[in-house]
Amino acid sequence: MATLTVWKFPTVDGADAAVSTLQSLEKQQLISLHDAATVSWEPGAKKPKTNQLHNTVGAGAMGGMFWGMLFGLIFLVPLLGAALGAAMGAASGSLADVGIDDDFIKRIRNEVTPGTSALFAMTSGAVLDKVHDAFAGHQAELIQTNLSDEQEKALREVFA
Protein backbone atom coordinates (compact mmCIF):
# COMPACT_ATOMS: atom_id res chain seq x y z
CA MET A 1 0.00 0.00 0.00
CA ALA A 2 1.29 3.46 -0.86
CA THR A 3 0.97 6.34 1.55
CA LEU A 4 0.79 10.03 0.76
CA THR A 5 2.26 11.85 3.73
CA VAL A 6 2.61 15.51 4.48
CA TRP A 7 5.17 16.53 7.07
CA LYS A 8 4.60 20.12 8.24
CA PHE A 9 7.50 22.10 9.73
CA PRO A 10 7.29 25.27 11.85
CA THR A 11 10.04 26.97 9.80
CA VAL A 12 10.43 27.93 6.14
CA ASP A 13 13.50 25.71 5.67
CA GLY A 14 12.36 22.72 7.77
CA ALA A 15 11.10 20.67 4.80
CA ASP A 16 14.32 21.15 2.86
CA ALA A 17 16.33 19.98 5.87
CA ALA A 18 14.09 16.89 6.19
CA VAL A 19 14.71 15.83 2.58
CA SER A 20 18.14 14.49 3.48
CA THR A 21 16.57 12.46 6.30
CA LEU A 22 14.07 10.93 3.89
CA GLN A 23 16.83 10.16 1.38
CA SER A 24 18.91 8.54 4.12
CA LEU A 25 15.98 6.37 5.18
CA GLU A 26 15.56 5.27 1.57
CA LYS A 27 19.25 4.36 1.26
CA GLN A 28 18.91 2.26 4.42
CA GLN A 29 15.88 0.54 2.84
CA LEU A 30 13.66 1.73 5.68
CA ILE A 31 11.22 3.35 3.26
CA SER A 32 10.52 3.29 -0.50
CA LEU A 33 10.18 6.78 -1.95
CA HIS A 34 8.03 6.90 -5.09
CA ASP A 35 7.80 10.67 -5.43
CA ALA A 36 8.19 13.77 -3.28
CA ALA A 37 7.97 17.55 -3.30
CA THR A 38 8.58 20.38 -0.86
CA VAL A 39 6.67 23.57 -0.17
CA SER A 40 8.18 26.56 1.60
CA TRP A 41 6.20 29.68 2.42
CA GLU A 42 8.13 32.80 3.30
CA PRO A 43 6.42 35.17 5.76
CA GLY A 44 4.64 37.92 3.82
CA ALA A 45 4.58 35.98 0.54
CA LYS A 46 1.21 35.52 -1.18
CA LYS A 47 1.89 31.90 -2.08
CA PRO A 48 4.45 29.23 -1.29
CA LYS A 49 7.36 28.05 -3.41
CA THR A 50 7.23 24.43 -4.51
CA ASN A 51 9.96 22.04 -5.58
CA GLN A 52 9.66 18.50 -6.90
CA LEU A 53 12.51 16.26 -5.81
CA HIS A 54 13.46 14.99 -9.28
CA ASN A 55 16.70 13.46 -8.06
CA THR A 56 14.99 11.17 -5.55
CA VAL A 57 12.14 9.75 -7.57
CA GLY A 58 12.07 6.36 -9.24
CA ALA A 59 10.87 5.24 -12.64
CA GLY A 60 7.22 4.97 -11.54
CA ALA A 61 6.95 8.53 -10.25
CA MET A 62 3.79 10.47 -10.93
CA GLY A 63 5.64 13.60 -11.86
CA GLY A 64 5.05 17.32 -11.81
CA MET A 65 1.47 17.20 -13.03
CA PHE A 66 0.36 15.40 -9.86
CA TRP A 67 2.13 17.85 -7.56
CA GLY A 68 0.99 20.84 -9.61
CA MET A 69 -2.63 19.74 -9.41
CA LEU A 70 -2.46 18.94 -5.71
CA PHE A 71 -0.68 22.20 -4.82
CA GLY A 72 -3.09 24.14 -7.03
CA LEU A 73 -6.04 22.67 -5.16
CA ILE A 74 -4.47 23.33 -1.78
CA PHE A 75 -2.95 26.77 -2.20
CA LEU A 76 -4.52 28.49 -5.22
CA VAL A 77 -8.25 27.70 -5.25
CA PRO A 78 -9.19 30.64 -3.00
CA LEU A 79 -7.41 32.98 -5.44
CA LEU A 80 -8.95 31.64 -8.67
CA GLY A 81 -11.83 33.01 -10.70
CA ALA A 82 -15.11 31.11 -11.14
CA ALA A 83 -14.23 29.37 -14.44
CA LEU A 84 -10.82 28.18 -13.28
CA GLY A 85 -12.30 27.31 -9.90
CA ALA A 86 -14.87 25.06 -11.58
CA ALA A 87 -12.13 23.23 -13.49
CA MET A 88 -10.19 22.75 -10.26
CA GLY A 89 -13.39 21.52 -8.63
CA ALA A 90 -13.65 18.81 -11.26
CA ALA A 91 -10.03 17.85 -10.62
CA SER A 92 -10.75 17.77 -6.90
CA GLY A 93 -13.52 15.29 -7.61
CA SER A 94 -11.04 13.07 -9.44
CA LEU A 95 -8.66 13.21 -6.49
CA ALA A 96 -11.48 12.27 -4.10
CA ASP A 97 -12.10 9.17 -6.20
CA VAL A 98 -8.57 8.02 -5.43
CA GLY A 99 -8.41 8.80 -1.73
CA ILE A 100 -7.43 12.47 -1.46
CA ASP A 101 -10.58 14.08 -0.15
CA ASP A 102 -11.69 17.65 0.55
CA ASP A 103 -10.96 17.25 4.27
CA PHE A 104 -7.33 16.40 3.50
CA ILE A 105 -7.02 19.40 1.16
CA LYS A 106 -8.68 21.78 3.65
CA ARG A 107 -6.50 20.56 6.51
CA ILE A 108 -3.30 21.11 4.54
CA ARG A 109 -4.54 24.53 3.37
CA ASN A 110 -5.25 25.55 6.98
CA GLU A 111 -2.00 24.23 8.42
CA VAL A 112 0.66 25.06 5.81
CA THR A 113 0.74 28.85 6.14
CA PRO A 114 3.27 31.68 5.75
CA GLY A 115 6.38 30.99 7.84
CA THR A 116 6.07 27.20 7.53
CA SER A 117 7.11 24.49 5.11
CA ALA A 118 6.00 20.98 4.21
CA LEU A 119 7.39 17.80 2.73
CA PHE A 120 4.90 15.84 0.59
CA ALA A 121 5.91 12.23 -0.09
CA MET A 122 4.39 9.19 -1.79
CA THR A 123 5.99 6.24 -0.04
CA SER A 124 5.54 2.58 0.81
CA GLY A 125 7.19 -0.07 2.94
CA ALA A 126 8.05 2.28 5.80
CA VAL A 127 9.55 0.86 8.96
CA LEU A 128 7.43 3.21 11.05
CA ASP A 129 9.42 3.22 14.28
CA LYS A 130 12.65 3.98 12.41
CA VAL A 131 10.99 6.71 10.32
CA HIS A 132 9.47 8.21 13.47
CA ASP A 133 12.86 8.17 15.21
CA ALA A 134 14.61 9.73 12.21
CA PHE A 135 12.15 12.64 12.07
CA ALA A 136 12.06 13.17 15.85
CA GLY A 137 14.62 16.00 15.73
CA HIS A 138 12.90 17.90 12.94
CA GLN A 139 9.91 19.25 14.92
CA ALA A 140 7.60 17.96 12.22
CA GLU A 141 3.89 17.31 12.41
CA LEU A 142 2.74 14.35 10.32
CA ILE A 143 -0.54 14.44 8.43
CA GLN A 144 -1.18 11.16 6.61
CA THR A 145 -3.51 9.69 4.02
CA ASN A 146 -3.25 5.99 3.26
CA LEU A 147 -3.95 4.85 -0.26
CA SER A 148 -4.67 1.26 -1.21
CA ASP A 149 -2.86 -0.27 -4.19
CA GLU A 150 -6.05 0.20 -6.21
CA GLN A 151 -6.31 3.87 -5.22
CA GLU A 152 -2.63 4.46 -6.03
CA LYS A 153 -3.10 2.90 -9.49
CA ALA A 154 -6.19 5.05 -10.09
CA LEU A 155 -4.29 8.14 -8.96
CA ARG A 156 -1.45 7.39 -11.38
CA GLU A 157 -4.01 6.95 -14.19
CA VAL A 158 -5.69 10.28 -13.40
CA PHE A 159 -2.37 12.08 -13.94
CA ALA A 160 -0.88 9.85 -16.67
Image: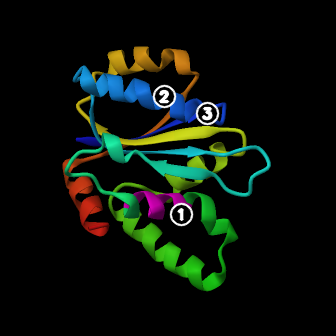
Q: Nearer the viewer, residue 101 or 82?
A: 82
First reached walking from the N terminus: tag 1 or tag 2? 2
Is 69 within the magenta?
A: yes
Q: Nearer the viewer, residue 106 or 121?
A: 121
Exactly how many numbered labels are in the figure?
3
Q: Describe residue 152's horizontal placement relative to residue 75 as left or right.
A: left
Most extreme residue toward the right is 44
Residue at which label 3 appears: 13
Inspect the image, locate mark 3, and give the three-letter code of the amino acid beneath it. Answer: Asp
- Across and down, in percent, residue 46 comes to 73, 57
Separation of disc 3 and disc 2 at Cα?
9 Å
- Residue 18, numbered circle: 2
Q: Describe residue 2's horizontal placement relative to residue 90 as left or right.
A: left
Is 70 within the magenta?
A: yes
Inspect the image, locate mark 2, and give the three-letter code of the amino acid beneath it. Answer: Ala
Q: Describe residue 23's horizontal placement relative to residue 75 as left or right.
A: left
Vertically, is 81 above or below 136? below
- Across and down, in percent, residue 91 comes to 44, 72
Mark 1 element type: helix
Can you say which quadrant of the picture contains the C terminus? bottom left
First reached walking from the N terminus: tag 3 or tag 1? 3
Mark 3 element type: loop
Separation of disc 1 and disc 2 at Cα?
24 Å
Q: Which residues are magenta?
A: 66-73
